[in-house]
Image (cartoon, grey):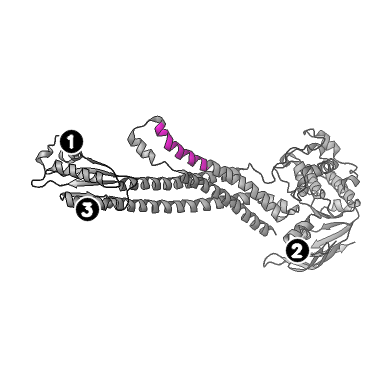
Amino acid sequence: MTGRLRAPAAAPEAERATRPGPSAPAAKSAAQRPIVPSTTVTTRALIAVIAIMTFLAGITIGAVSAVSNVAAEWTADIAREATIEIKPGDGLDLDAALAKAVELAKATPGIAEAKALDPAATARLLEPWLGAGLDLANLPVPRLVTVTLAASADAQTLPALREALTRQVPSASLDDHRLWAERLAATTRTAMTIGLAVLALVATATVLCVTVATRAAVEAARFVVEVLHFVGARDTFIVSEFQRHFLTVGLKGAAVGGGAAVALFFLGSTVPSWLRVDQQVDTFVGAMTIDARGYGGIVGVAVLVALVTTLTSRLTVYRTLRGIS
Amino acid sequence: MVRFENVGLRYGMGPEVLRDVTFGIPPHSFQFLTGPSGAGKTTLLRLLFLSLRPTRGLITIFGRDAAKLAADETAALRQRIGIVFQDFRLLDHLSTYENVALPLRVQGREEASYRAEVTELLHWVGLGERMHVLPPVLSGGEKQRAAIARALISRPEILLADEPTGNVDPSLARRLLRLFLELHKSGTSVLIATHDIGLMDQFDARRLVINQGRLTVYD
């Protein structure tokens, strides 16, 4: 068309000649800028919102995962141990009874180790209540045997040991820590329920925040939608341009937030060993250790946030186009 | 090409802003659309550009009933109509070159296939040296010419221009009119909405006068 056109007689050549501007004999094939502006204040704010909410959701997922791991570990530890208690009685040879109990325990299939606590160890256990320098010989203090179950132990191991003790050491009783295990399991269930509830709230807040922020960002770019619409772009083209832009924005924000959460848990689980901190600190930060499932959960929430951003932009652009038409 | 028959339009429950509008835009024609401010010029342009649907009456564009167009069909027809907005509507983050090339880019064409075409048109409208400049640093006249170039780049069969000389001095207004006339000679139907009597007096063309929502045609 333009080839057939003759430039207007007084085309603004003079105006052109007097204006400063880059020398451009022809448009260069430089990469074209994206149609949806990528560096607006709204875009940067949206990336920040996505990063913060992904970080919070990642921390929550990691925390729930860590609590779950610790609870499972503690429960397993308790379930692997039992205690034989031998009460002193008239005419009872306590040391002989202890030796017999240890012998019976070691003879029971599924028991890895049985060890009697000597008087000194027993005195140390009672020290917080009865003070130091305790002479157990003068007190009717029960003596203990710690029993550790082997990996091959089954449901019959402890009942078999209990039966043997009842027959051969009547003054002994076997504590399989079931009460503690049940209490710990109940506490764990409560902690997990609270954790999952918090996770649900954080996930909901994340989705809502990201949705609202994305809508605001699309609204801020409404002018671009209108111009594309008026120059004859099909709706699918406009939607795909915005979708691509917001997928990039979502992935950037989610990568920053999710990456920060992963880094926090990774450092929390490794730094104490590097610094050789004392056991109490190690126990405290050890609770921050998460396994592959925890890291997977954080990556999953980051991907989810990016997808929510993309889907929201798609729906909002379609709604904007319906409004324009 | 375009036919309006007894077209009426109202916004919501308000009064009719266009009443019984009947006219046509024949191929290779040139016309001014004029009338006082608020008479309905921009509304009529929006109907012509398929961004509004009439409340009543029939609009036929390129032989298609405008009321029965699907979204994709509307986009395809819109590619055959060029429009120059009063406020230019250039994208500030794209260069002049990219703004002018936008209608071709949205059609999915490769940049290499239209580079020469866009460059030639930019030179033709006097923006050859300003093609890599962003719109915020262009003057009002340069923005106007960039907007016109964008409307022309897809070789529209109809060009609609809303107050194209509203933001420029009389000298540039004359140059822009010559540009539109040159386009008209090349076969494009041109409709210029303006209330600039001086501009209309420079060229003897058909006038569509709109007043209080009613249109009168002076051939």
Q: Residue furthest top?
A: A275
- Per the rendering, the mark at residue A163 is 3
- Residue B84, given in percent of the width and then of the height, sits at 78, 51
Q: Which residue is mark 1?
A: A120
Three-letter code for the amino acid on which mark 3 is drawn? Glu
Specify the segment rendered in magenta: A257-273
Asked if residue B44 can be seen in this view, the reply is yes
Look at the numbered disc 3 and give the secondary structure of its residue. helix
Quarter of the figure with the C terminus of chain A: bottom right
Residue A249's place in the image compared with B4, above or below, is: above
In this picture, residue A163 sits left or right of residue A255: left
Q: Nearer the viewer, mark 2 or mark 1?
A: 1
Q: Is residue A134 magenta?
A: no
In this picture, residue A242 sits left or right of residue A187: right
Q: Distance from label 3 to label 2 (Cα)? A: 88 Å
Q: Nearer the viewer, mark 1 or mark 3?
A: 3
In this picture, residue B64 sits left or right of residue A280: right
Q: Residue furthest left?
A: A91
Three-letter code for the amino acid on which mark 2 is drawn? Leu
- In the image, A286 versus A4, the foreground residue is A286
Q: Is residue A258 magenta?
A: yes
- Per the rendering, the mark at residue B170 is none
Q: Distance from label 1 to label 3 (Cα)? A: 29 Å
Which of the two labelled residues, at mark 1 and mark 3, occupies the earlier sequence position? 1
- Residue B113, given in percent of the width and then of the height, sits at 81, 44
- In the image, A126 versus B68, the foreground residue is A126
Look at the numbered disc 1 and give the secondary structure of its residue. helix
- Per the rendering, the mark at residue B69 is 2
**Residues at marks 2 and 1, common chain?**
no
Please state the chain letter of the residue tagged with numbered disc 3 in the rendered image: A
